[in-house]
């Protein structure tokens, strides 16, 4: 969903010489657009803007530039035409496996305070155990450089455990003028340990809801249980790599299943989504898991996928460039190597279209002008701008 309307000055007007050096050293002409056709016949024009090493997330700033994270720890400022500047920071990122620098969001009032939110993986014992952490920071611009200051912890996964998978750590801010305004939502994966998703004494396998200062709202659904359960908005999740709000202010998230059984869920306060007790997929060993329809006490997915699409990145579209996509979810596919378009209707959803790609798609966002932007996965991953063709 589009998050900004106000312009912001990154101070390049007063630092023209320094900025010119940065741009000259990093800018290359965008690759001419190519076209791709969806399963329903609609064609998209795709323009390459820049290339990254293992990018993970992006967020737009009010001046139409963006911030892009790379898993190894780089935070990169990118102009709309592809000029890149690395943002300085002293965040100690534990890179490896599925972990590293993760999600990034600019605050709705960024133009006033230049605040952003970041997630990343940290280790406090030299890499033996790891967990996700969410911080706020200020994006400072001075002397031709960009730097993060005032880095403040808001949340961390508890406990830190062994392994390098299923951190999830996607973040979303409640939309303005809805009951969710003023709250920070975080996806916390099960860390490939399964049973923590049903354990109320740890915050793994949950969707988290916090005040913007990191405190737990007193009206959270499990607040009366005390302790860490006061953070929880929903429970029973596996590996949630996409989260967004629809045009009615409803929260949606998708998560990877085990061997198939990926899910798109309408996230409701206090609901249990069943992992690892139920799934529409099976264990990687072939061992069967009870399907969702065997346990009506758990919240069933709006859509599940067999075979797997490997969902990553998620935006619910509300722009004007694609008239037929209003309130549709766009999901990047790591396994499917496709953009998967899902039509949302109240609490229900269904897949309606795919755009087959030749690479894994890690992230998908809506730009300020209604164009759709995607980040491919792994090394030499392209940042591409998508608009209707013709």
Image (cartoon, rainbow, N blue to C red):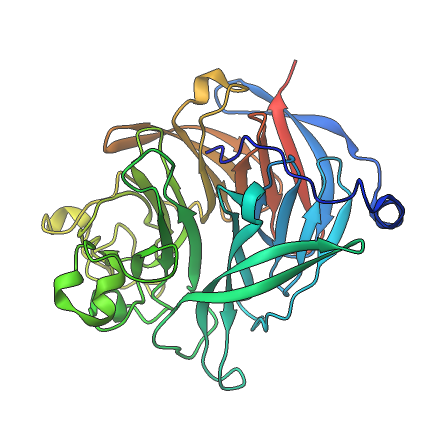
Quadrant assignment for the C terminus? top right
10 lies above or below 353: below
Relative horizontal placement of residue 42, taking residue 273 as reference (left or right): right
Relative horizontal placement of residue 207, taking residue 144 as reference (left or right): left
Quarter of the rendering containing residue 232: bottom left
Quarter of the rendering containing residue 165: bottom left
Find residue 266 and report its horizontal and vertical position in percent. 27, 41
Report the front residue among 347 and 376.
347
Q: Which residue is drawn at 30% across and 31% down?
A: 349
Find residue 339 and report its horizontal and vertical position in percent. 51, 36
Q: Residue at x 64, y 43 (%)?
A: 66
Q: Is residue 162 visible?
A: yes
Q: Is residue 305 visible?
A: no
Farthest residue, direction top: 390
Relative horizontal placement of residue 213, taking residue 206 as reference (left or right): right
192 lies above or below 172: below
Find residue 293 and report its horizontal and vertical position in percent. 14, 46
């Amino acid at each position: 969903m589009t998050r900004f309307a106000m312009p912001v000055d990154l101070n390049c007007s007063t630092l023209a010489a320094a900025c010119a050096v940065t741009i000259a050293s990093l800018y290359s002409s965008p690759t001419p657009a190519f076209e791709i056709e969806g399963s329903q016949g609609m064609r998209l024009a795709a323009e390459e803007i820049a290339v990254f090493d293992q990018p993970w997330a992006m967020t737009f700033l009010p001046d139409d530039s963006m911030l892009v994270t790379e898993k190894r720890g780089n935070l990169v400022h990118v102009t709309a035409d592809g000029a890149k500047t690395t943002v300085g920071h002293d965040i100690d990122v534990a890179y490896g496996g599925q972990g590293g620098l993760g999600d990034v969001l600019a605050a709705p009032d960024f133009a006033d305070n230049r605040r952003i939110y970041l997630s990343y993986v940290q280790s406090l014992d030299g890499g033996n155990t790891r967990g996700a952490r969410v911080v706020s920071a200020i994006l400072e611009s001075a002397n031709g450089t960009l730097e993060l200051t005032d880095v403040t912890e808001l949340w961390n996964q508890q406990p830190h455990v062994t392994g390098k998978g299923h951190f999830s750590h996607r973040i979303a801010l409640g939309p303005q003028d809805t009951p969710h305004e003023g709250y920070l939502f975080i996806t916390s994966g099960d860390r490939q340990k399964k049973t923590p998703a049903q354990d109320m004494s740890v915050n793994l396998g949950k969707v988290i809801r916090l005040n913007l200062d990191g405190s737990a709202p007193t009206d959270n659904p499990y607040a009366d249980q005390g302790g860490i359960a006061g953070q929880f908005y929903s429970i029973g999740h596996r590996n949630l790599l996409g989260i967004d709000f629809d045009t009615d202010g409803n929260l949606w998230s998708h998560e990877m299943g085990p061997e198939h059984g990926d899910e798109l869920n309408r996230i409701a306060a206090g609901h249990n989504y069943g992992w690892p007790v139920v799934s529409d997929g099976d264990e990687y060993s072939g061992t069967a898991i009870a399907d969702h329809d065997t346990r009506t006490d758990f919240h069933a997915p709006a859509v599940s996928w067999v075979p797997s699409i490997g969902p990553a990145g998620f935006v619910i579209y509300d722009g004007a460039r694609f008239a037929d996509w209003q309130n549709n979810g766009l999901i990047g596919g790591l396994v499917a190597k496709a953009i998967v378009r899902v039509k949302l209707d109240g609490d229900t959803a269904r897949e309606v279209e795919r755009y087959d790609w030749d690479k894994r798609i890690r992230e998908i966002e809506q730009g300020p002008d209604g164009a759709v932007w995607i980040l491919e996965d792994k090394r030499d991953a392209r940042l591409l701008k998508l608009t209707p063709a013709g």
